[in-house]
Image: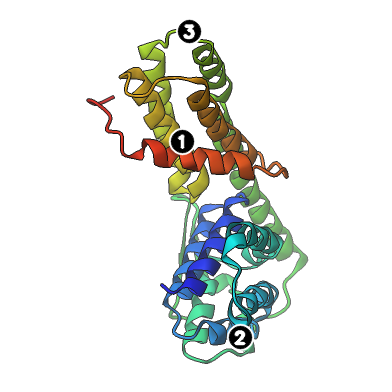
Amino acid sequence: MDFVKQYIVQTISSAANNLRLSTGKIEVVALLREAIAKSGDLGQFIKQMKKITVLSTFAIRLDEIYEYLTSSPVDLFRLSDKIRDHSRFLIRDLSSMLDMVNPYNFQMALEKIENGETNPDIERSITKDEISIDLLKGKVSYNTTEKPVDRPFKSETDIEKENIIFEEDKKEEEDFFQNYEAEILKPIKPIDSMLKRLSRGEPGDPDELNGFSKTMINNGELSAKIGFDIIANMHQVLAKAMLLIKTRDLMPGRDVMESMRACLIVIVAVVRGKEVDITSYLNRAEEFGREIQSIKVKGLI
């Protein structure tokens, strides 16, 4: 993947990590990233996106980033700061776009763009006859063989039914992320307390270190599954550091403890969506992760 594509894919990933995304929205982000990576002419791809109403505002934002990268030399010394700025720049419009599409009609849009067929037909809503909802299994399947036909105006009853359905879906998403947030944040304070004890020179409890490392591994895997790469990485770093402290391959000095606390701070800030600058903590946590990467953990958990 060339630099421009890699840069834009990274900004989209970073912006998405700041949103609470359902499984469907995560799939849309994955489709978008893949389409950008595989596009032959990225400038033309973005131009075609701008012709589609539900994608146009977000595409305009992408085009501004694309112009920045291609119209003048990029200042490599400010690259990390710039990519963070561009990621924040995309968050609102990415969120709005994800509210208007689903994996099915977004895939249709990508196919139209690929085939050079961008036109109003692509912007239509999916009719109710194209969606088969299995209420018993709780699954949604799409009928891609049926062609769109004219429909009468919806009755008030139909509109109310749809509102109820979407309200339930929204509640399920909110419940999921509330549960996810609670699960991720639950061990943070106990781990922070343990790190403070270790920084004071108190001996670490092997069972406690072992238990917390397992929790970090599990929560990291959960975060990775739903696309929260930064959170997942912080959990992986913490899990390995705890195991290394347990085996005495890493000494729990003040610098090590502060680096591990930086990982905790990044997790909490991202999960809670805190609008504060955590650049220094993220840089310290990532540098710490690189430092311990080459150290092998003795034995298994």
Residue located beneath label 3 in the image: 202
Taking 110 as reference, is 225 above or below it? above
- Residue drawn 53% across the image and 67% down it: 7
Return the mark for residue 235.
Answer: 1
Quadrant holding the N terminus: bottom left
Residue 226 coordinates in the image, percent (x, y): 48, 49
Kindly identify the amino acid type of the residue bearing the numbered disc 2. Lys
Distance (Cα) linking label 1 and label 2: 39 Å
N-term mark: 2 or 3: 2
- How dense is the environment of label 1, judged by Cα within 10 Å: few (below 14), some, or many (20 and up)? many
Residue 190 coordinates in the image, percent (x, y): 54, 18
Secondary structure beneath dot 3 equals loop
Task: Report the side of 64 relative to 181 (left or right).
Answer: right
Q: Quadrant of residue 175?
A: top right
Number of marks: 3
The outermost residue toward the left is: 299
Taking 249 as reference, is 32 above or below it? below
- Residue drawn 44% across the image and 84% down it: 40
Task: Report the side of 265 relative to 104 (left or right).
Answer: right
